[in-house]
């Protein structure tokens, strides 16, 4: 090894070696997916596969050659190797793809969530594919071409590599086009280009012109249902985390994951609801914005007030209680309480984990002490993976055995599903307990109460070799986009706002989405404003005249 390091290596040779290593060892998942897309591994397909690999090697070589200068090459090559090895691990281990939303998730998650992903397999992969070759490059003696001749040599290598890549692409285009067109996820699997593109998109958004938040719904006023009323209203909006609709027995799942909610009188379950995104960083800002999924962008949502602001304009007090990794900017101008950090002696916390019941601690006092009509948002930890077994107290391990590792390759498919279903069972308990609290408050304190629940996105549990969430929406599976949603109202609440329960029950199976939430909450609370779209208001047509 020392003899090998002692020899001077030409910069073009090192550059080509890094290009080959990145294109092959750093992209195993890309090549397995591409091979399947191209028709499988066979002698007939070898020319196409070899040609595609050569195109990528030549393209990488052309790009890396432009950075093959002294004091530049080594840091760039090392950074790319470590980045590619990290991305390759997560792509292979969880079936995720790297896009702008995934990079946003990385930057906006908290330390506790991030550490759940760390494993020996991860460290070994990054070590072998990233740190070992990086260390070799760091110690290598590299001979860099100098002066004008060096510039011409680099230009010739980069231009020649790119020209050959283009020629090969033209020759193979007819065979490559169908595979690439039908499998658009391939561009999100090719490392490190996927990470570079995603990072560029994320940083451009973050470093753009400082956001000026435009007002929204400043004309908001309480409607006729509020006239002459002396009873206070409390509306609880529960934002679930990573709960997919198909694992709720209320939606026909074969396991009884909703035994308590199934017995809650007056509960209305909506069984055909789609999310705005496949990750919290997208879905939460989207669902509370006035933009539908087709119009939503992070910059648009950040530059305009949202649902919670409109409710405040109408005179309601709004409080966000969080047991997750923050509200993603949604609660910037309302009351905020973070209950996710453990406190010694707290019965709802185990180690570094606080279970969702902690969101209800002090809620009766908050309701009693408020002199305004109140909207409380409870942001769950819910079913956030991969450590599903940490999301619920021990008494909720009904389905077993469970996967208690963050390395899914060590677990059976059944044990992963068992652990996930236990999180849904705990969510069932949490939501039922929330309803009981609101029912009791309505009876004892003379308050009209309601609860609206929906999840931010779903989760893949190994279907089609996909795990977790965050797939680009264009080809995200239903497991990641179909979410549960349900509504409960006290008798006083439904009578006050003239809500026809029979009408709502008839709409339970209609196609709905996060697009409906903004307008439906305003409709539910009879808030009049020009920004309310009756076509997206679930309660429009189901509210009797007051």
Image: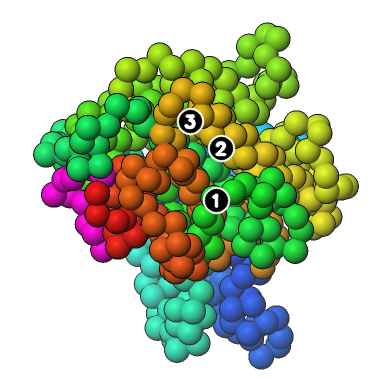
Secondary structure beneath label 1: loop
Q: Which residues are magenta?
A: 526-535
Q: At 20% from the left edge and 36% from the top edge, which residue is drawn?
A: 227
Q: Position of residue 20 (x, y in %)?
A: 58, 59
Q: Are marks 2 and 1 in contact (CB under 8 Å)?
A: yes
Callout 1 environment at 10 Å: few (<14), some (14 to 19), or many (20+)? many
Q: Residue at x 24, y 37 (%)?
A: 226
Q: Which mark is residue 435?
A: 2
Task: Identify the element where label 2 is drawn.
Answer: helix
Q: Characterize the local packing of mark 3: few (<14), some (14-19) or many (20 or more) Cα atoms within 10 angstroms.
A: many
Rendered position, 191 above or below 442: below
Of labels 3 and 2, earlier in sequence is 2
Which residue in the structure is indicated by mark 1?
Answer: 267
Q: Position of residue 74 (x, y in %)?
A: 50, 38
Which image quarter is the N terminus in?
top right
Q: Residue furthest right?
A: 401
**Percent x, y for residue 524?**
33, 47
As for residue 530 lying within the magenta part, the answer is yes
Say whether residue 517 is left or right of residue 26: left
């Amino acid at each position: 090894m020392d003899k090998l390091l002692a020899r001077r290596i030409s910069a073009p040779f090192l550059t080509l070696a890094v290009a080959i290593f990145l294109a092959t060892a750093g992209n195993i998942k890309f090549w397995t997916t591409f091979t399947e897309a191209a028709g499988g591994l066979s002698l007939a397909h070898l020319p196409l596969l070899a040609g595609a690999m050569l195109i990528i090697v030549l393209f990488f070589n052309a790009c890396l050659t432009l950075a093959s200068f002294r004091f530049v090459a080594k840091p760039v090559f090392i950074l790319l190797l470590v980045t590619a090895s990290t991305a390759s691990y997560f792509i292979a281990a969880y079936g995720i793809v790297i896009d702008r939303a995934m990079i946003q998730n990385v930057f906006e998650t908290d330390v506790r969530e991030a550490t759940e992903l760390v494993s020996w397999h991860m460290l070994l992969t990054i070590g072998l594919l990233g740190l070992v070759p990086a260390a070799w490059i760091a110690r290598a003696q590299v001979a860099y071409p100098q002066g004008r001749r060096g510039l011409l040599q680099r230009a010739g290598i980069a231009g020649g590599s790119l020209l050959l890549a283009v020629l090969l692409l033209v020759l193979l285009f007819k065979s490559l086009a169908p595979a690439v067109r039908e499998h658009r996820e391939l561009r999100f699997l090719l490392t490190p280009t996927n990470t570079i593109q995603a990072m560029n998109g994320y940083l451009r958004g973050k470093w753009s012109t400082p956001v000026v938040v435009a007002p929204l719904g400043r004309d908001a006023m309480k409607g006729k249902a509020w006239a002459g009323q002396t009873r206070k209203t409390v509306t609880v909006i529960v934002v679930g985390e990573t709960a997919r609709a198909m694992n709720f027995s209320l939606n026909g799942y074969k396991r009884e994951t909703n035994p308590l909610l199934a017995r809650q009188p007056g509960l209305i379950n909506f069984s055909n609801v789609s999310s705005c995104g496949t990750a919290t960083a997208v879905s939460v800002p989207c669902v509370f914005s006035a933009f539908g999924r087709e119009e939503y962008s992070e910059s648009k949502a950040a530059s305009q007030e949202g649902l919670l602001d409109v409710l405040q304009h109408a005179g309601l007090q709004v409080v966000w209680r969080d047991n997750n990794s923050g509200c993603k900017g949604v609660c910037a101008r309302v009351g905020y309480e973070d209950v996710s950090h453990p406190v010694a002696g707290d019965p709802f916390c185990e180690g570094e984990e606080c279970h969702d019941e902690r969101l209800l601690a002090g809620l009766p006092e908050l309701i009693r002490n408020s002199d305004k009509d109140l909207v409380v948002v409870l942001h769950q930890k819910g079913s956030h993976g991969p450590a599903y077994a940490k999301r619920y107290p021990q008494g909720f391990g009904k389905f077993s055995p469970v996967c208690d590792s963050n390395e899914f390759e060590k677990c059976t498919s059944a044990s992963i599903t068992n652990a996930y279903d236990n999180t849904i069972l705990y969510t069932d308990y949490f939501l039922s307990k929330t309803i009981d609290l609101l029912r009791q408050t309505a009876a004892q304190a003379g308050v009209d109460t309601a609860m609206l629940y929906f999840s931010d996105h779903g989760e893949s549990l190994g279907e089609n070799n996909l795990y977790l969430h965050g797939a680009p929406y264009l080809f995200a599976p239903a497991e990641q986009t179909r979410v549960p949603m349900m509504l409960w109202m006290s008798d006083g609440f439904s009578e006050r706002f003239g809500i026809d329960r029979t009408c709502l029950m008839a709409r339970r199976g209609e196609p709905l989405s996060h697009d409906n939430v903004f307008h439906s909450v305003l409709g539910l609370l009879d808030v009049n404003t020009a920004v309310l779209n009756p076509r997206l208001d679930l309660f429009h047509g189901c509210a009797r005249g007051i």
